[in-house]
C-alpha cells in the first residue's frame, strides 16, 4: 500500500473588535483558493499558498501555521515566524518533513504532497526533494485544484476547537499558545 503525507499552511489572525463579523479579505493573484471566517475574536484563514494577504478592517495581527499529517500520525503544527518565501519553507521542511517521513515511512515508501504555492515550487525546494528521493517521493499537485487539499480538514478541526474556547483571543501571543495547544 502506498503511504501519503500531506502538508499545508493555515493563517490565523486576531482582532477582538471583529468577533462574530465576516472577515473582509483580499485575494492575492497567486492564490487559486482562499476562505476565511471570524471565530470568537479571531479569523481563521485557510489558503493553498504559503502566505495570506487577508486584512481586517480594524487592523489586528496574525500567525501562520504549517502542518502535516498522514494516516499514521499527525505532526504538531509549526508556527512560521517569517514570511513564507522559499528559503523559509525549505528550513521548515528540512527540520520537520525529513524527520517525520523517516519515522513514519522508514522503508522509504512514503509520498509527500504539497500544493503549487510558489515557495513549494522554488528551485531550491525542488532540488531538496530530489536529494531525498531515496527516502520519500514528492507527488505532483494538479494545477488549479484546491479541492484536493486534505489539510483543509485539519484546519477545520482547529477552527472548531478554537471557536469552543473562551474568552476570545485578545492578542497574538494567546492565539499562538492556543493553536499550539490543540
Image (tube, rainbow, N blue to C red):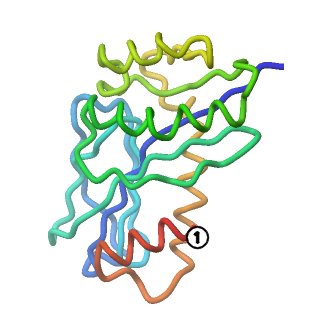
Q: Is residue 127 above or below residue 6?
A: above
Q: Residue 55 in the image: state x and y as whole percent.
A: 20, 57
**Residue at the location (68% across, 23% down)?**
110
**180 sits to left or right of 153:** left
**Residue at the location (30% across, 70% down)?**
14
| Quadrant of the image containing the C terminus | bottom right
Q: Nearer the viewer, residue 67 or 21?
A: 67
Q: Is residue 131 above or below residue 89?
A: above
| Quadrant of the image containing the N terminus | top right
Q: Is residue 130 above or below residue 182?
A: above
Which residue is denoted by mark 1 in the rendering?
161
Q: Secondary structure at mark 1?
A: helix
Q: Residue 32 in the image: state x and y as whole percent.
A: 35, 30
Q: Nearer the viewer, residue 24 or 134?
A: 134
Determine which quarter of the picture holds residue 116: top left
Q: Residue 173 in the image: state x and y as whole percent.
A: 32, 75
**Residue at the location (39% across, 68% down)?**
176
Amino acid at each position: 500500500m502506498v503511504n501519503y503525507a500531506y502538508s499545508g499552511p493555515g493563517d490565523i489572525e486576531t482582532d477582538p473588535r471583529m468577533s462574530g463579523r465576516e472577515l473582509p479579505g483580499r485575494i492575492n493573484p497567486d492564490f487559486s483558493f482562499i476562505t476565511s471566517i471570524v471565530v470568537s475574536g479571531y479569523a481563521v484563514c485557510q489558503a493553498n499558498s504559503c502566505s495570506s494577504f487577508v486584512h481586517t478592517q480594524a487592523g489586528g495581527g496574525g500567525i501562520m501555521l504549517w502542518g502535516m499529517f498522514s494516516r499514521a500520525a499527525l505532526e504538531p503544527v509549526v508556527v512560521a515566524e517569517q514570511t513564507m518565501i522559499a528559503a523559509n519553507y525549505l528550513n521548515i521542511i528540512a527540520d520537520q518533513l525529513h524527520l517525520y517521513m523517516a519515522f513514519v515511512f522508514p522503508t522509504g515508501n512514503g509520498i509527500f504532497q504539497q500544493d503549487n504555492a510558489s515557495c513549494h515550487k522554488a528551485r531550491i525546494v525542488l532540488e531538496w526533494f530530489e536529494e531525498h528521493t531515496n527516502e520519500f517521493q514528492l507527488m505532483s499537485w494538479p494545477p488549479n485544484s484546491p479541492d484536493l487539499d486534505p489539510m483543509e480538514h485539519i484546519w477545520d478541526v482547529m477552527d472548531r476547537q478554537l471557536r469552543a474556547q473562551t474568552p476570545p483571543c485578545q492578542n497574538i501571543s494567546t492565539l499562538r499558545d492556543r493553536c499550539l495547544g490543540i
